[in-house]
Image: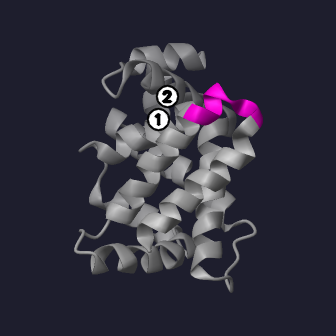
């Protein structure tokens, strides 16, 4: 009879994958991930049949985390600006707190390793994020820009905000607000 899989080992493998991918990219070997997790490489394949499965499950784990944070306290009945601010603020705070996770999530999102099933599962988790960004997207597409541009613009402006927050951490809240105001004015 096979031993049950350990949630702790699975978690250790996912955490190791985050660190190794952030450091070396998606081409990192499963041997390095397993070594960082403190398990044999064969053990990795007990939890994830392939490296691709590991990467897809890692992406979903990261999305569960960020969308969970955003959904917590989401102002469902707030104005579009209030909802967009919530997405901006929470996702920026998460990115600042977990730069490796953000980096890995972005790399995976841009890669071809994610399956359509993984992308669909991720999309189904967005919930209120979609409702907030739908209104923002309408403003962008009304300006003749393609669907998805608002999210890309938000991400790029958050990258700039993170750079300056790292340089001036005492101004974090002020920079968060000012950069959001700039983003919001661009939508007007």
Query: In the rendered structure, which disc, 2 or 1, sits on the residue that comes first in sequence?
Result: 2
Q: Quadrant of the C terminus?
A: bottom left
Q: Position of residue 58 (x, y in %)?
A: 48, 42
Above or below 133: residue 70 = above
Q: Quadrant of residue 76?
A: bottom right
Return the mark for residue 17: 2
Q: Which residues are magenta?
A: 164-170
Q: Position of residue 124 (x, y in %)?
A: 46, 71
Q: Quadrant of residue 143?
A: bottom left
Q: Position of residue 181 (x, y in %)?
A: 58, 61
In the foreground, 76 or 66: 76
Q: Secondary structure at mark 1?
A: helix
Is 46 covered by the magenta stretch? no
Crowding around mark 2 (Cα neighbors within 10 Å: few <14, some 14 to 19, many 20+) is many
Is 166 covered by the magenta stretch? yes
Q: Quadrant of the N terminus?
A: top right
In the foreground, 50 or 77: 77
* Mark-to-mark CA distance, 2 and 1: 12 Å
Above or below 61: residue 23 = above
Q: Position of residue 71 (x, y in %)?
A: 66, 67
Magenta segment's dominant SS is helix
Q: On the image, numbered disc 1 is attached to which residue?
A: 103
Q: Is residue 158 left or right of residue 78?
A: left
Q: Is residue 98 left or right of residue 26?
A: right
Query: Which residue appears at 51% of the width and 68% of the height?
Result: 126
Query: Which residue appears at 45% of the width and 42% of the height?
Result: 105
Crowding around mark 1 (Cα neighbors within 10 Å: few <14, some 14 to 19, many 20+) is some
Of badges 2 and 1, the one in the foreground is 1
**Residue 77 appears in view:** yes
Q: Is residue 176 left or right of residue 145?
A: right
């Amino acid at each position: 009879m096979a031993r049950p899989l350990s949630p702790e080992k699975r978690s250790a493998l996912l955490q190791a994958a985050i660190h190794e991918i952030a450091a070396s990219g998606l081409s990192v070997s499963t041997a390095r991930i397993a070594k960082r997790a403190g398990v044999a490489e064969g053990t990795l394949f007990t939890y994830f049949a392939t490296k691709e499965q590991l990467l897809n499950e890692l992406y979903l784990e990261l999305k569960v985390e960020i969308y969970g944070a955003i959904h917590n306290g989401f102002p469902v009945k707030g104005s579009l600006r209030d909802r967009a601010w919530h997405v901006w603020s929470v996702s920026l705070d998460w990115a600042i707190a977990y730069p490796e996770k953000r980096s890995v999530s972005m790399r995976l999102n841009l890669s071809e390793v994610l399956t359509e099933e993984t992308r669909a599962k991720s999309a189904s988790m967005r919930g209120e994020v979609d409702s907030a960004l739908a209104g923002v997207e309408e403003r962008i597409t009304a300006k003749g820009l393609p669907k998805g541009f608002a999210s890309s613009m938000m991400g790029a402006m958050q990258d700039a905000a993170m750079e300056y927050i790292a340089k001036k951490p005492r101004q974090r809240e002020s920079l968060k607000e000012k950069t959001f105001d700039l983003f919001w004015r661009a939508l007007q």
